[in-house]
Image (tube, rainbow, N blue to C red):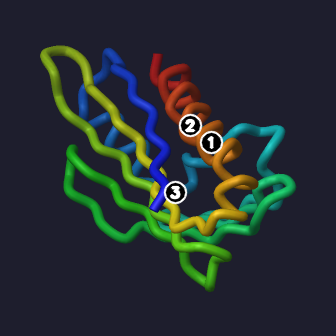
Amino acid sequence: MSTFQSKTSINKPVNEIYHFLADMNNHQRLMPADDISDWSSTTDSASFNIRNMIKLSLKMAEQVPDTLLRIEAVEKPPFAIELKWELTSKANATEIAFTITADLNMMMKMVASGPLKKLADDEVANLANLMS
């Protein structure tokens, strides 16, 4: 398994950030616009293409209020992938860790590691910008 993680702290209450992330319709705003196309979403699921890589269909798999959101791929992705948002309340801020875990073979690791790390970093940076 390959792991790509990005962290930040946002000066907003944890419940505000949790409710934003709990709606998959909001996740399009977190994606790098130049790398994502054909976005379609509902409250619980989303599907899109990552430029020059794969088509992903995701669904909300687990929610622990104000703490955890776990999203997993559906519809036979080219490799197993999980996205996890972990939230921790700290004084007047929220600590956020976003982790992408992917089961990549050696060839896919060479091709997908850069874009997946960029995706993790971009989603966290975009969340911080939107919530500021």
The answer to whether 127 is drawn above or below residue 112 in the figure is above
Q: Residues within 10 Å of mark 1 (few under 14, many from 20)?
A: many
Q: Residues within 10 Å of mark 3 (few under 14, many from 20)?
A: many
In the drawing, does residue 104 fall left or right of residue 111? left
**Which of the two marks, 1 or 2, is nearer to us in this view?**
1
The picture places residue 88, in percent across and down from the top left corner, at 20, 34
The answer to whether 131 is drawn above or below residue 75 in the figure is above
Give the secondary structure at mark 3.
Answer: helix
Residue at position x 55%, y 47% from top? 26
Q: Which residue is mark 1?
A: 119
Mark 3 belongs to which amino acid? Answer: Met
Q: Which residue is mark 2?
A: 123
Which is more toward the observer, 132 or 58?
A: 58
The picture places residue 52, in percent across and down from the top left corner, at 86, 56
Q: Which residue is mark 3?
A: 24
The picture places residue 53, in percent across and down from the top left corner, at 79, 60
Which is more toward the observer, 102 or 84?
A: 102
Q: Which of the 4 image quadrants contains residue 50?
A: bottom right
In the drawing, does residue 21 fall left or right of residue 66? right
Q: Is any part of residue 59 visible from this angle? A: yes
**Which of the two marks, 1 or 3, is nearer to us in this view?**
1
Residue at position x 77%, y 39% from top? 33
Give the secondary structure at mark 1.
Answer: helix
Q: Residues within 10 Å of mark 2 (few under 14, many from 20)?
A: some
As drawn, the residue found furthest toward the bottom would be 76
Q: Is any part of residue 29 visible from this angle? A: no
The picture places residue 114, in percent across and down from the top left corner, at 68, 42
Q: How many marks?
A: 3
Mark 1 touches mark 2? (CB < 8 Å): yes
